[in-house]
Image (spheres, grey):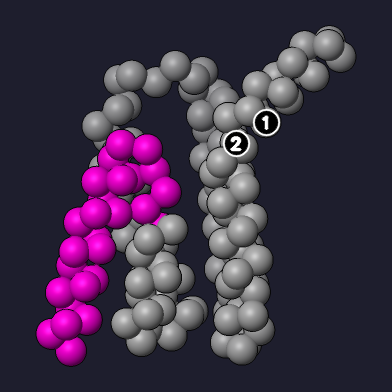
Amino acid sequence: MIFHSLVLFITAFIAGGLNAVAGGGSFITFPVLIFTGVPPISANATNNTALWVAALASAGAYRNNLSIPQRQLFLLCGVSLVGGMLGSVALLYTSPDVFQKLIPYLLLLATLVFTFGEPLKVWFGRQSKKSS
């Protein structure tokens, strides 16, 4: 038990630093939570709760440095809120066994979005300029 607590503490410290610099701390914390014996659905909820607190702190710290129009910011927040709610409801109705089988694919999808998010944003930006 002490070993798991120490591993989780060190992991949280490293992931927090990673999130502060570049994001992606969940790629470390989620697997470590599962490694230490936390059931997958609980690990997901724990991880997302920690991220929510960190995101709120980051939003407060960077609120004066936004380069996005306020209207677009509210739209993105709304879409994120709806997506989070739909994901939460889906998770409530997903059996632990099914969720455990989906984890590798969900992590792969998240990795692809994290890796190619910026190039896709640039590409979609060019496409929308072509069509207008």
Residue 78 percent location from the top left of the image: 57, 42
The residue at the point 36 percent across, 87 percent down is 37
Which segment is the magenta one?
Answer: 1-26
Q: Name the residue under label 2.
A: 117
Taking depth in this image into account, of 28 and 48 the one nearest to the observer is 28
Residue 112 percent location from the top left of the image: 62, 48
Report helix, strand or loop for mark 2: helix
The residue at the point 61 percent across, 64 percent down is 106
Q: Mark 1 points at which residue?
A: 120
Look at the image and say whether residue 23 sits in the magenta stretch.
yes
Residue kind at label 1, given as amino acid type:
Leu
Residue 38 percent location from the top left of the image: 37, 83
Q: Quadrant of the N terminus?
A: bottom left
Taking depth in this image into account, of 6 and 90 the one nearest to the observer is 6
Above-or-below relation of 66 to 25: above
Q: Residue most toward the right?
A: 131
Look at the image and say whether residue 39 sits in the magenta stretch.
no
Labels 1 and 2 touching (C-beta < 8 A): yes
The residue at the point 25 percent across, 63 percent down is 11
Is 70 placed left or right of 112 in the picture?
left
Is 116 placed left or right of 129 in the picture?
left
